[in-house]
């Protein structure tokens, strides 16, 4: 076995001092990208389920559509620890029905806005920027068979 000279041992220590922080930063960066990707997917899922909930209410009942959408939104988005719900707006078209509901077959459009709280994740170690706001819009066709 070969014995390292003092300059070779110093070189290995210097290389380690440069490489380890870079590797740690890369791992945290990959974790941050993972958090953002998961948050985007969860926001899309919550907004899609809100649109689906709005489209399953009876066609003549716009208020019930909004209630279903809000329940689906809150119930889904609260499961992501670093995602904070900001707002959900669902546009249920007001057809010629007297009570303000949609016509069967119309589209329901929901827009969900949430903030990704990066400060609650390990990314906060290297991410000096404020939390990010994300917005997702989903359009869902209502059933042509849905009625009162």
Image (tube, rainbow, N blue to C red):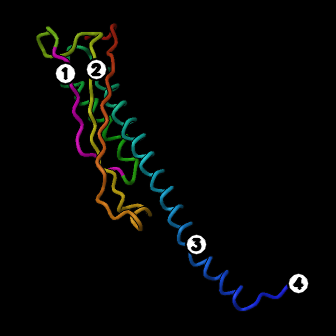
Q: Nearer the viewer, mark 2 or mark 4?
A: 4
Q: Is residue 77 rendered magenta in the image?
A: no
Q: Name the residue under label 1.
A: 62
Q: Earlier in the sequence, mark 1 or mark 4?
A: 4
Q: Which of marks 3 and 1 is in front?
A: 3
Q: Which of marks 2 and 3 is in front?
A: 3
Query: Compared with residue 128, is residue 38 higher up or lower down, i.e. above or below?
Result: above
Residue under the image location 36 percent in, 30 percent down: 48
Residue 136: image location, x then y, percent: 31, 35
Q: Earlier in the sequence, mark 3 or mark 1?
A: 3
Q: Distance between the residues labelled 2 and 3?
A: 56 Å
Is mark 2 in CB contact (under 8 Å) with mark 4?
no
Q: How far apart are marks 3 and 1 (CA)?
A: 58 Å
Query: Compared with residue 127, is residue 43 higher up or lower down, i.e. above or below?
Result: above
Q: Mark 4 points at which residue?
A: 1
Q: Which quarter of the picture shows residue 20?
A: bottom right
Q: What element carries label 3?
A: helix
Query: Compared with residue 46, is residue 32 higher up or lower down, i.e. above or below?
Result: below
Q: Is mark 4 on a helix, strand or loop?
A: loop
Q: Mark 2 points at which residue?
A: 57
Q: How far apart are marks 2 and 4 (CA)?
A: 78 Å
Q: How far apart are marks 1 and 2 (CA)?
A: 8 Å
Q: Earlier in the sequence, mark 2 or mark 4?
A: 4
Is mark 1 in CB contact (under 8 Å) with mark 2?
yes
Q: How far apart are marks 1 and 4 (CA)?
A: 81 Å
The outermost residue toward the left is: 98
Start-end of magenta stretch: 83-94
Mark 4 Cα shell of 10 Å, populated few (<14), some (14-19), many (≥20): few
Residue under the image location 51 percent in, 55 percent down: 30
Which numbered tag is attached to residue 20?
3
């Amino acid at each position: 076995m070969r014995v390292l000279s003092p300059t070779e041992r110093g070189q290995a220590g210097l290389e380690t001092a440069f490489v380890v922080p870079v590797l740690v930063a890369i791992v945290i960066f990959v974790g941050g990208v993972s958090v953002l990707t998961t948050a985007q997917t969860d926001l899309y899922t919550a907004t899609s389920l809100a649109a689906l909930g709005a489209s399953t209410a009876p066609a003549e009942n716009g208020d019930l559509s909004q209630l279903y959408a809000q329940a689906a939104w809150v119930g889904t988005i609260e499961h992501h620890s670093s995602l904070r719900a900001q707002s959900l707006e669902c546009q249920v078209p007001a057809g010629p029905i007297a009570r303000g509901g949609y016509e069967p077959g119309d589209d329901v459009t929901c827009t969900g806005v949430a903030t990704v709280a990066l400060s609650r994740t390990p990314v906060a170690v290297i991410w000096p920027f404020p939390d990010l706001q994300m917005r997702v819009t989903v359009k869902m066709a209502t059933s042509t068979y849905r009625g009162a």
